[in-house]
């Protein structure tokens, strides 16, 4: 039987998740039927393991199914019913996951406003550059970390996960290309990878990567040229364009103007004209 989980230990697991560890769901008993676990008993559940117990193997198994479903669905905190062998338990589920990571490769003019906007949007921002005078805390006060990196291997010591949003905005296209190449040759892709550059340079880069045997589905995953078309020109505007695309990918948006999608004005005008014509008749 798994040992009981203390409040302090449960809080430790939650803090680990929030600081970049594996997502976890905390599960606490609120009330139960007679003979069931006492209020306050708790478990912590990860994708492939768990800690704590409700005091019964069948109840634990039922709780694990509910908690892992909450992990998979990115469920908000709330109560749920757990049943097994005639026992009914009300539990409180509280998912804990690290914030999405925004890794900006390059610390130039676009990176500064993008770091600021990214932090405002809830990303944990990391900025990488090979120039010590650019990779400074003074230039990027909103970043979680600013690191000097060798562009020959920019992601050494950087954990790239399905929660990582990767933006390549270095001072030279060759550095962007090499970083992109390293990501596409890796075992798994981040949630988002975008590379700045013109249509011509983007096409040349993708053709070169295809010639190296990188699969077409991986090449199609690259957002290049980067950002949404908002007519951006200044570094700040380009940062907004990129950030808008990050939100679209993260939240499942379309990038379509809401006015065009909802057509509120068109419907109102049409309905108003129809009503006016009916009154005239």
Image: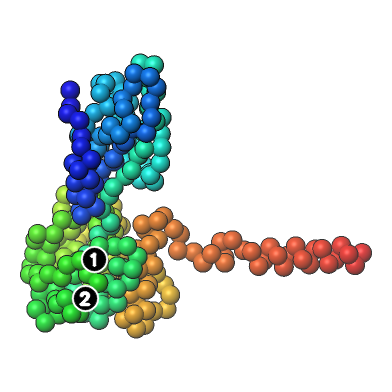
Location of residue 198 in the rendering, given as x and y in whole percent from the top left corner: 30, 75
Q: Quadrant of residue 248?
A: bottom left
Binning the other alpha carbons within 10 Å of mark 1 as few (below 14), some (14 to 19) or many (20 upward) gives many
Q: Nearer the viewer, residue 250 or 70?
A: 70
Q: Could you tell whether 187 is left or right of 26 in the image? A: left
User: Residue visible at 78% across and 67% down?
Assistant: 273
In the rendered image of this protein, does residue 61 appear above or below residue 247?
A: above
The chosen color scheme is: rainbow
Q: Which mark is residue 125?
A: 1
Q: Quadrant of residue 80?
A: top left
User: Residue visible at 44% across and 58% down?
Assistant: 253
Quadrant (top left, top right, bottom left, bottom right) of the N terminus: top left
In the rendered image of this protein, does residue 215 appear above or below residue 225?
A: above
Location of residue 47 in the rendering, given as x and y in whole percent from the top left corner: 24, 38
Quadrant (top left, top right, bottom left, bottom right) of the C terminus: bottom right
User: Residue visible at 12% across and 69% down?
Assistant: 147
| Helix, strand or loop at mark 2 | loop
| Number of on-image labels | 2
| Helix, strand or loop at mark 1 | strand
Location of residue 211 in the rendering, given as x and y in whole percent from the top left corner: 18, 60
Binning the other alpha carbons within 10 Å of mark 2 as few (below 14), some (14 to 19) or many (20 upward) gives many
Q: Quadrant of residue 235?
A: bottom left
Q: Are marks 2 and 1 in contact (CB under 8 Å)?
A: yes
User: Residue visible at 14% across and 77% down?
Assistant: 136
Location of residue 175 in the rendering, given as x and y in whole percent from the top left corner: 15, 72
In the rendered image of this protein, does residue 265 appear above or below residue 86?
A: below
Residue at the spot of label 2 = 140
- Inter-mark Cα distance, 2 to 1: 10 Å
Q: Is residue 219 visible?
A: no
Name the residue furthest top.
85
């Amino acid at each position: 039987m798994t040992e009981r989980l203390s409040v302090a230990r449960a809080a430790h697991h939650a803090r680990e998740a929030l600081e970049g560890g594996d997502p976890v769901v905390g599960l606490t008993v609120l009330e139960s039927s007679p003979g069931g676990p006492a209020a306050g008993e708790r478990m912590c559940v990860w994708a492939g393991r768990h800690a704590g117990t409700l005091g019964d193997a069948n109840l634990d198994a039922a709780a694990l199914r509910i908690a892992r479903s909450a992990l998979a669905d990115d469920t908000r905190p709330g109560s749920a019913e757990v049943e097994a062998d005639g026992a009914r338990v009300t539990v409180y589920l509280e998912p804990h996951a690290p914030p999405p990571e925004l890794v900006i490769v390059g610390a130039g003019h676009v990176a500064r406003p993008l770091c600021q906007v990214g932090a405002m949007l809830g990303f944990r921002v990391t900025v990488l550059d090979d120039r010590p005078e650019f990779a400074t805390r003074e230039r990027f006060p909103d970043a979680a970390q600013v690191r000097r990196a060798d562009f020959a291997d920019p992601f050494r010591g950087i954990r790239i996960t399905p929660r990582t949003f990767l933006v390549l905005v270095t001072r030279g296209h060759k550095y962007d290309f090499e970083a992109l190449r390293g990501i596409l040759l890796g075992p798994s892709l981040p949630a988002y990878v975008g590379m700045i550059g013109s249509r011509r340079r983007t096409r040349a880069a993708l053709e070169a990567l295809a010639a190296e045997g990188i699969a077409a589905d991986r090449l199609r995953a690259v957002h290049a040229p980067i950002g949404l078309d908002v007519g951006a020109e200044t570094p700040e505007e380009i940062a907004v364009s990129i950030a808008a695309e990050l939100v679209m990918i993260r939240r499942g948006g379309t990038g379509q103007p809401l006015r065009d999608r909802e057509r509120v004005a068109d419907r109102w005008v049409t309905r108003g004209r129809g009503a006016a014509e009916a009154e005239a008749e």
